[in-house]
Image (spheres, coloured by chain):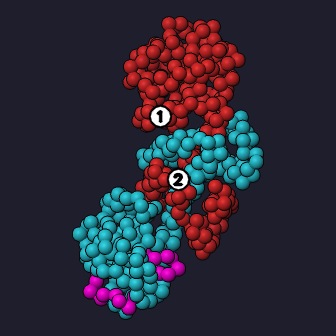
Chain colours: A red, B cyan
Amino acid sequence: MRITIIGSGNVATHLAAAFKNAGHAIVQVYSRDLQNASLLAYHVRAEAIDNLDQINAETDLFIIAVKDDAIETVATALAPYQKLIVHTSGATDLQVLLNHSQKAGVFYPLQTFSKTKEVDFNTVPICIEGADEHITSQLNELAYTVTQNVYRISSAERKTLHLAAVFACNFPNYLYYLAQQLLAEKQLPFDLLRPLILETAQKVKEYLPADVQTGPAVRNDEKTMTDHLQQLQEKPGLQQLYKLLSQGIITMDNDG
Amino acid sequence: MRITIIGSGNVATHLAAAFKNAGHAIVQVYSRDLQNASLLAYHVRAEAIDNLDQINAETDLFIIAVKDDAIETVATALAPYQKLIVHTSGATDLQVLLNHSQKAGVFYPLQTFSKTKEVDFNTVPICIEGADEHITSQLNELAYTVTQNVYRISSAERKTLHLAAVFACNFPNYLYYLAQQLLAEKQLPFDLLRPLILETAQKVKEYLPADVQTGPAVRNDEKTMTDHLQQLQEKPGLQQLYKLLSQGIITMDNDG
């Protein structure tokens, strides 16, 4: 497929590389910042542009991987080419594209991307949605060229998924940060916790989280929880968080 | 070394197997439940006992891996043998053993263990503390027979570590659970999130959490956060948690 990448951030970078590796031709990379566009374009042997007037119409697919609030503006500029347009956003309804073009879809890779870290794209779930069955089937085929995990997900489902991803990724990373800060205060190295963090994530590769919950709260070990809260007495924010999460764990079985 | 294991839970099971693999002799395995003792003893070719009167004095080390509130009782029963006694608890002061014997120490493997899941013990950090330098050095040597990661950690430091481990392991697992529940309500499979969870943990193998924080809060993306809170409107507990964690992420740089 001939693919044009709009954007040069983390998602754009990883998607462009995955498509290139899968044998697709990347026609152009657009970014408002020509240097960013050039850097990515160089890697995937595409032309770099920093103006949507320079779009090459000889393409099959526009992939919009820009900030959520810029998607609609970009879609307006691309609609006249009458090519398939998809966005890559977890939080954005397909309707935002449909307002401008019927040849629209969503191609949402559910992963946390950093520019500096390689990702094995083959295991990344890609959530696709098409304006019609023909488009969905095209996107399905495209997705399977870069990953084994393809899911047909409606805009409503994707909203839930995006929220759940905050709980599964962004919030745990923040808790890692809090743990690291607690250690740093006592000059203890974060390396002490790294194997624990990894094993905690690896456990839920096979099990459901409820089945592998450990710690004082799930044992209702009040002595340890009281001692922990005592240690946090000068950190009211952390105390509140500790209480809220522990209370949640204690009543976990009743939620399910 | 000749080692006697007191306990047959997760820590006892994984430690006994690691010692056996490293070439140590497991003399006996004690559990109040003879069947549990026998199961573990069979695997490590030891004698199973369910009564502390049956202790074989021909051993070099007692490893107490029982519930925190049972450690002291067990220590009282073992003290007369005048052998080295260590406990494996993150939350328990060395003093609890010193009340009964001067030949005491701590051998705390900082990992989350489940009986059904193998752990690569070689990467598990082991935190050691001895009543004197001779004991610390003995425990240091022993720890290096089963892992590459050995740390000398005082009882005061271990308290901090144990608290930090709750933030790094128990609480993230609970957030995985909440994410899984949000998906389950919409009949979406947890498999969608598993690669994300794993990658989030793998990122902090190399980076500090603050450097790889992603999501709407760190971007201060109010539109997305408002939408997420809207989705949680019938779940006040989750709303409160979402606000507290997001607020923490927004002010993250100021904490460090």
* Dots 1 and 2 on the same chain: yes
Quadrant of the frame with the C terminus of chain A: bottom right
Queried whether the magenta region covers residue A80, the answer comes back as no
Left or right placement of residue A182 versus residue B226 in this view: left
Which residue occupies the foreground of this view, B42 or B65? B42
Q: Chain of mark 1?
A: A
The image quadrant that residue B149 belongs to is: bottom left
Left or right placement of residue A232 versus residue B69 in this view: right
- Residue A84, visible in the rendered structure: yes
| Residue A241 position in % (x across, y down) | 65, 58
Q: Amino acid at mark 2?
A: Leu
| Residue B213 position in % (x across, y down) | 55, 43
**Badge 1: few (under 14), some or many (20 or more) residues near its Cα, within 10 Å?**
some
Q: Secondary structure at mark 2?
A: loop
A39 relative to B95, above or below:
above
Return the residue at label 2. Answer: A208
Left or right placement of residue A76 versus residue B124 in this view: right
Q: Amino acid at mark 1?
A: Asn
**Dot 1 and dot 2 residues touching (CB under 8 Å):** no
Residue interval drawn in magenta: B52-71
Quadrant of the frame with the N terminus of chain A: top left
Label at residue B110: none
- Residue A35, visible in the rendered structure: no
| x 63%, y 68%: residue | A229
Return the residue at label 1. Answer: A149
B161 relative to A160, above or below:
below
Left or right placement of residue B67 versus residue B8 in this view: right
Q: How many marks?
A: 2
Q: Secondary structure at mark 1?
A: loop
